Image (cartoon, rainbow, N blue to C red):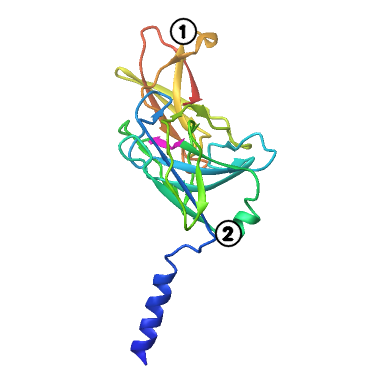
């Protein structure tokens, strides 16, 4: 009896791996080399988003914390490899295609989810429970259509390279950063900042007067604090005669 139950269980698990004949298979990829706004090639493990735009919507707007308006981010795939998105095939339930995603259009975005560590090295933030938490900028994949087919007749569509250059929106309620301390240690200025959030990257700009604070001062941006009362420290080279500083999103 135990052997029979085990065989039935194995068959049920194996059967669930196959798509239903009337489900939709959505296939996408990019040709590369995909790049960030600064011109550097997309890092391995970076995220691409399969996006559904609602009928009559002007387009999907993605905020810095990964939320969206005007449609839905249906899938976030942290799959970038060698500067491009390899072939991704995503199955959408037939019932959802007839209800949630009826009408509208499908597209693919490159998401810039880089976070800079204390070592100044950028790494993709990845996903939490399949959702992205940090998005600095996005770039829509152009030059081709996302391939949508039934589970029995799908084909891959190789699309063009993409540039993630559109800064994401800042969510409502995001606090403004406040400089709480500044000190010079050797050849560097250490600026302590409060009121940052973990889904935005911050950096320093400087100038000789308050009205000319436009020069990028800190080399690498830093991810905001994970707790409301936590402070971060931004470092910039000290200038002869002093300078004024401002904390800005990078």
Q: Is residue 114 magenta?
A: yes
Q: Is residue 113 magenta?
A: yes
Precedes in sequence: disc 1 or disc 2 = 2
Q: Residue sitting at 58 percent across and 59 percent down?
A: 94
| Chief secondary structure of the magenta portion | strand
Residue 95 appears at what percent x and percent y?
Answer: 61, 60
Secondary structure category for the residue under label 1:
loop
**Residue 237 appears left or right of 27:** left
Residue 38 appears at what percent x and percent y?
Answer: 40, 23
Magenta residues, as a range?
111-115
Camera-near label (1 vs 2) is: 2
Seen from the viewer's position, the closer of residues 227 and 149 is 149
Residue 174 position by quadrant: top right
Residue 218 appears at what percent x and percent y?
Answer: 39, 22
> Disc 1 designates what residue?
208
Residue 48 position by quadrant: top left
Q: Residue sitting at 38 percent across and 31 percent down?
A: 34
Seen from the viewer's position, the closer of residues 134 and 222 is 134
Seen from the viewer's position, the closer of residues 74 and 143 is 143
Secondary structure category for the residue under label 2:
helix
Q: Residues within 10 Å of mark 1 (few under 14, many from 20)?
A: some
> Disc 2 designates what residue?
94
Residue at the farthest front position: 153
Residue 57 appears at what percent x and percent y?
Answer: 67, 38
Where the N terminus falls, by quadrant?
Answer: bottom left
Q: Separation of disc 1 and disc 2 at Cα?
A: 61 Å
- Taking 32 as reference, is 29 above or below it? below
Residue 138 visible, this angle: no
Q: Residues within 10 Å of mark 2 (few under 14, many from 20)?
A: some
Q: Which mark is residue 230?
A: none
Residue 5 visible, this angle: yes
């Amino acid at each position: 009896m135990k052997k029979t139950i085990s065989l039935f269980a194995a068959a049920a698990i194996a059967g669930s791996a196959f798509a239903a004949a009337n489900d939709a298979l959505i296939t996408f990829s990019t040709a590369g080399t995909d790049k960030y706004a600064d011109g550097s090639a997309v890092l391995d493990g970076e995220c691409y988003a399969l996006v559904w735009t609602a009928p009559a919507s002007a387009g999907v707007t993605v905020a810095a914390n990964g939320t969206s308006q005007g449609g839905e981010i249906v899938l976030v795939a942290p799959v970038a490899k060698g500067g491009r998105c390899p072939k991704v095939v995503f199955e959408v339930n037939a019932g959802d295609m007839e209800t949630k995603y009826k009408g509208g259009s499908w597209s693919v975005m490159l998401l810039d989810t880089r976070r800079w560590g204390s070592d100044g090295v950028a790494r993709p933030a990845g996903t939490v429970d399949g959702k992205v938490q940090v998005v600095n900028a996005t770039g829509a994949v152009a030059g081709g259509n996302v391939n949508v087919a039934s589970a029995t007749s799908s084909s891959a569509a190789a699309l063009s390279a993409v540039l993630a250059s559109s800064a994401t929106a800042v969510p409502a309620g995001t606090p403004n950063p406040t400089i709480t301390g500044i000190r010079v240690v050797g050849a560097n200025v250490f600026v302590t900042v409060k009121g940052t959030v973990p889904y935005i990257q911050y950096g320093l700009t400087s100038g000789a007067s308050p009205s000319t604070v436009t020069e990028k001062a800190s080399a690498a941006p830093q991810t905001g604090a994970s707790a409301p009362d936590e402070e971060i420290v931004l470092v910039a080279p000290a200038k002869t005669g002093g300078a004024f500083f401002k904390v800005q999103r990078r």
